[in-house]
Image (tube, grey):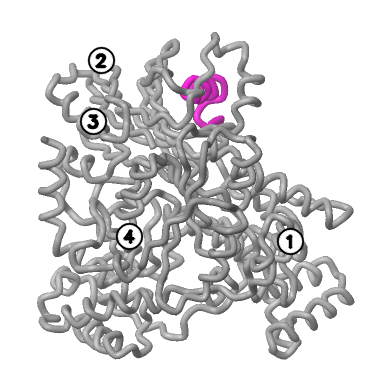
């Protein structure tokens, strides 16, 4: 990943050389080329390139054209189409940055929807005296900004930006979102510092900021084919392209491999494309996280043998998901030690691209309960097919058919009348039974908390009833910014084939019954990818879980906090109730039901707050060095 940073003073004062040096420090990285910059009255842009492909090698950044300048981090997947449409204005420049700026020149900020790929960018529009910050629909490439009375500053890196903005106050809304739903859209831990929302542009002038969406989820799209084989063919083609465009690199590629269907499909397709010489990438290395008693072993071993790839295995026991000293850097995060090891392994292999299977469960229809499909049939007045479908779900879920029909009828109501449903996990099962909540009443009143849904947009309610939870799951994942690289891996082209925008749009636009049927999660995926997989994988129906691994790392921390619960920072700051959190920590230490997902967020936040001062001092010293 390339790095971007910059500053714009609204009074257009001259940028001191020392301040430009500080901005250079924010983008400097051992994994990138030396930073380059561009100055104009009141403005300084900085960029440090990590060359993913020989295609963009030598493209100057910041890139200048006419009255505008741009820094661009990312990869464009529809280059050929853009080159054709913009050939008259490109003046021979064909790099990704030139294409992005040409799109802005022709269609403005709303036209950035034309850029398909993983990217973020900063555009200086001198005519409008405007800085435009933008991120692709999935928000894979982070970009943060802080607007102050006389300036706006931005950076790919959150920690250095917090230091530059000289802000140390914790954002209470971020904390509330973290404790209620594992994240808060567009917020960071630092008050006044925001993340550019996925699929949005942020235009900043001396008069203020305007946030504008240029992408919307495919809520109203409908794709229907005559034959089911046509869906399979199109899915194969889109998935092939999703993997192929992410192998546009002259360096080795690392791909996570768990043995599940999602990561295994990525590895099998990437291996095929490399072996047949269809991509630039020279070789593929798989990275597998193992834990004792895992049910994944025969499946990832089968994929490794079938794909003939190099493989690396790391034990989660050696790199716990959470320790007192590894709880994230600029922001709270699980798995920091494992992420640091993955980054080290990527450097050893010479890899710049890191593939994951994230988002696969949701996009590929891993729903054991997708009985809302009956609602669509009822809405269309197709009573016979609705009863037949309801009977199928009744048998698969082992619940009375009346329950299936009742839920479908409720789902068929207009969005304004449909009641809120119990949240479901990505596989369609209902969420945890325990709902214990330790958030302090005073904190809840101060923030105005009404529930976890309060932080998220409700656009998903306008989707067809049988698609609402799919769209909702996608939107919450994107707004949480769960697809961004972990901080130790931010120098890598961290990317997700299942977040390929054409693939996402297709899977959310075809009939839900094609994707998944009673007793057949991932029905379309299994039919389309059957020949891509080794024999072991074709028969897989189970899914391993890492819940025990999480608990193994949390119990020692819970016991540590119970030594002096009254000294907890989350209690002293008024975020949680002492009595409630103490009771739940005791329950966790004895492996009792305690709404562990929320409690793990409380534990993470507590230890992150404790180590915040030490971490920031270390970051400042490393930058000054």
Q: Which mark is residue 351?
A: none
Towards the viewer: 266 or 325: 266
Q: On the rendered structure, is 405 left or right of 602?
A: right
Residue designated by label 4: 338
Helix, strand or loop for disc 2: loop
Q: Which residues are magenta?
A: 96-112
Between marks 1 and 4, how big is the CA–CA gap? 33 Å
Find out whether residue 590 is within the magenta segment. no
Task: Tell which circle, 3 or 1, labels the residue nearer the N-terminal end.
Answer: 3
Is residue 453 shown to the viewer in this render? yes
Dividing the picture into quarters, in which one does residue 91 lie?
A: top right
Q: Which mark is residue 41?
A: 2
Q: On the rendered structure, is 230 left or right of 556?
A: right
Q: Which mark is residue 151?
A: 3
Q: Which mark is residue 524?
A: 1
Between marks 3 and 4, how big is the CA–CA gap? 38 Å
């Amino acid at each position: 990943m390339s790095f971007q940073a910059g500053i714009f003073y609204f009074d257009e004062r001259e940028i001191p050389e020392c301040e430009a040096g500080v901005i250079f420090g924010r983008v400097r990285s051992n994994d990138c080329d030396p930073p380059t910059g561009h100055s104009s009255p009141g403005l300084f842009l900085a960029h440090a390139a990590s060359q993913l492909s020989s295609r963009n090698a030598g493209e100057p950044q910041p890139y200048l054209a006419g009255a505008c300048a741009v820094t661009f981090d990312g990869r464009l997947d529809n280059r050929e189409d853009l080159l054709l449409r913009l050939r008259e204005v490109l003046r021979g420049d064909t790099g990704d940055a030139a294409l992005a700026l040409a799109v802005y020149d022709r269609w403005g900020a709303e036209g950035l929807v034309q850029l398909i790929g993983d990217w973020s960018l900063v555009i200086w529009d001198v005519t409008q005296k405007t800085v435009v910050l933008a991120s692709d629909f999935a928000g894979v490439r982070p970009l943060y900004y802080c607007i102050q009375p006389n300036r706006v500053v931005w950076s790919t890196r959150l920690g250095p930006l917090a230091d530059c903005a000289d802000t140390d106050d914790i954002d209470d809304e971020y904390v509330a979102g973290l404790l209620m739903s594992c994240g808060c859209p567009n917020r960071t831990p630092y008050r006044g510092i925001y993340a550019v929302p996925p699929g949005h542009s942020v235009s900043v002038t001396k008069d203020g900021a305007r946030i504008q969406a240029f992408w919307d989820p495919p809520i109203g799209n409908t794709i229907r084919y005559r034959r089911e084989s046509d869906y399979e063919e199109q899915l194969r083609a889109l998935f092939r392209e999703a993997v192929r465009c992410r192998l546009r690199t002259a360096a080795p590629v690392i791909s996570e491999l768990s043995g599940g269907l999602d990561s295994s499909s990525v590895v099998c397709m990437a291996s095929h494309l490399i072996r047949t010489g269809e991509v630039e990438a020279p070789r593929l290395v798989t990275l597998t996280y193992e834990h004792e008693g895992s049910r994944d072993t025969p499946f990832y071993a089968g994929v490794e043998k079938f794909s003939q790839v190099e493989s690396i295995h790391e034990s989660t026991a050696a790199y716990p998901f959470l320790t007192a000293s590894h709880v994230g850097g600029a922001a709270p995060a699980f798995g920091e030690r494992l992420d640091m090891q993955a980054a080290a392994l990527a450097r050893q292999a010479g890899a710049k691209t890191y593939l994951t299977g994230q988002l696969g469960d949701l996009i590929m229809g891993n729903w054991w309960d997708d009985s809302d499909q009956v609602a669509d049939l009822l809405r269309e007045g197709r009573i016979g097919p609705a009863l037949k479908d309801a009977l199928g779900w009744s048998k698969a879920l082992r619940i009375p058919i009346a329950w299936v029909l009742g839920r479908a009828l409720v789902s068929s109501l207009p969005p304004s009348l449909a009641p809120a449903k119990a949240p479901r996990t990505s596989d369609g099962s209902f969420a945890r039974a325990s709902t214990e909540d330790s958030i302090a009443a005073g904190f809840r009143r101060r923030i105005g908390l009404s529930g976890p849904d309060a932080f998220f947009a409700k656009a998903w309610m306008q989707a067809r009833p049988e698609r609402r939870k799919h769209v909702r799951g996608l939107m919450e994942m994107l707004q949480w910014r769960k697809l961004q690289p972990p901080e130790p891996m931010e120098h890598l082209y961290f990317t997700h084939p299942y977040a390929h925008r054409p693939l996402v749009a297709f899977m959310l636009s075809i009939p839900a019954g094609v994707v998944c049927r009673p007793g057949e999660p991932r029905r379309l995926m299994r039919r389309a990818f059957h020949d891509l997989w080794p024999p072991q994988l074709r028969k897989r129906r189970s899914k391993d879980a890492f819940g025990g691994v999480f608990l193994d790392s949390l119990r020692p921390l819970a016991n540590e906090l119970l030594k002096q619960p009254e000294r907890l920072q989350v209690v002293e700051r008024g975020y949680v109730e002492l009595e409630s959190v103490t009771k739940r920590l005791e329950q966790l230490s004895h492996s009792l039901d305690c709404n562990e997902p929320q409690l793990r967020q409380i534990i993470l936040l507590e230890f992150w707050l404790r180590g915040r001062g030490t971490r920031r001092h270390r970051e400042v010293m490393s930058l000054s060095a």
